[in-house]
Amino acid sequence: MLAVTPQRMRMIVEGFIDVLELGLEKEGQMVPMLPTWVFGWPTGEEKGSYLAVDLGGTNLRVCEVELEGNGKFAITQSKYKLTDEQKVGDGQALFDFCAECLASFIQDHYTNEDGSVLLDKDIALGFTFSYPCVQERIDHGLLLRWTKGFGAAGVEGQDVVEMFKKSLQKNNVPVEITALINDTTGTLMASHYVDPRTRMGIIFGTGCNCAYVEKVKNIPKIAHLGLPGDAELAINCEWGAFDSETKEYLPRTKYDIHIDETSNKPGQQLFEKMIAGLYLGEVFRLVLCDMIEEGVLFHGQNTYKLDKPFCFDTALVSLIEADSTDELLTVIGLFSHFYSLETTVEERKFFKRLAVAIGTRAARLSACGIAAVCSKMGYLEEGGCGVATDGSLYNKYPKFPERIHEALVDIFGEKGRLIHTYHAEDGSGVGAAIIAAMAQERKAKGLYPQV
Ligand code: GLC
């Protein structure tokens, strides 16, 4: 059920390429291919001190980034946990919380001994807001829809920069929002800053998405702006939405359908829901529940602790796969500790195979997205490309990168080896600072808002 054959992958890639092109051609498509108004690449010489706020999924992060030029930087940061209520409560309150955290960060890092704030002018801030936003310029963005389980009221359809500004003013925070950034675009630029081979930025975390750089002449939907055709513009694909309307490419199982139908956004982000960290643990749990129902697992035991949706974190699935002991000792501990369940060695071996299958499927589907962008852009013909990648799935799930590479060879044959993925620089922090610096420079040169 969880297998994705090479033939199926090639079929998905074909469909994916069409969908990417459609998003560039027309507004309002399923995969929206959003212009980010980040033009070209960083030079590596961007310098200065910037603040970054990163609202991405699990945590809120505030960073101070010192860009030193030469592809070098230093970063200081604080993390704040977001509660489930904040994710789905009042939207303005969520931005208020961001502003309060930023205010306390500034208090801690920019205060004189007498308590006065040590700033002669507003500091430039890059706001990493990793949800699909339609941007008219780099410091603007209408939230198209929440993803990753968020649902805060009164934000969809609104300019999130304006909402955040309102909260900053309320809290007297001395910053100027210079750029609104998606984590994938940040990853792309931050990685290119240190390694110019980088062509794509991908997040495999709570969500899954990709950004790359496109020539303006290949983006028909912005032709009316009259920008130079050879100018290069970063595109936030929002590929997590792939196949959401078509429903003809992805090999969805009854578990995927259940996850989608019981989510706060049914019918959306169908590709993401088969790949991303938010969902893989739930796929695992649903398979177990099915087998409990059939009477083939945990004989004679009370399994009620597995009944709660999303109680099986994806991190546990990766721990199961990572257990290399013969008896699968970590798996014993994990089931008895979290779910008060005894397991037989056969059950544990099955769990490990299931973890392998779920992780492998996610990696193979991800490879289809990478292959689609590479084919569309002709990167293989240019001798290959670098794919900067971040997120807990890529960094922590056993063999995730190897499985992507294997799948790329299944799709392209030996040529697939020309695509290199590697762990990215911190896109949401350092990337945000670099993009804020690039935006500031364009503004200083009068190249604003867009051209
Ligand atoms: C979701 C968001 C997207 C983000 C990705 C990774 O897909 O819609 O904007 O880049 O998660 O965080």
Image (cartoon, grey):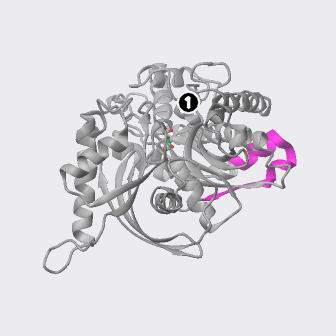
Name which quarter of the figure residue 111 lies in: bottom left
Among the 4 quarters of the image, the one containing residue 249: top right
Indicate the quadrant where residue 325 lies. Answer: bottom right
Check if residue 84 falls in the magenta segment.
no
Q: Is mark 1 within 8 Å of ligand 1?
A: yes
In this view, the residue farthest toward the front is: 446
Mark 1 surroundings: few (<14), some (14-19) or many (≥20) residues within 10 A: many
Q: Is residue 292 above or below residue 320?
A: above
- Name the residue at 59% across, 38% down: 237
Q: Main secondary structure of the magenta part?
A: helix
Residue 302 seen in this snapshot: no
Range of residues picked out in magenta: 404-423
Residue at image point 63% right, 26% down: 26
Helix or strand or loop: what does disc 1 sit on?
A: helix
Camera-side residue: 386 or 253? 386
Q: Position of residue 32 (x, y in %)?
A: 57, 31
Residue labelled with disc 1: 241
Q: Is residue 411 left or right of 70 when viewed as pictured?
A: right
Query: Which residue does the image show at 45% across and 31% down from the upper left?
Result: 144
Left or right placement of residue 154 versus residue 48 in this view: left
The residue sitting at the bottom extreme is 113
Please name whichever residue, 14 or 215, is drawn nearer the observer in this view of the structure: 215
Amino acid of disc 1: Ala
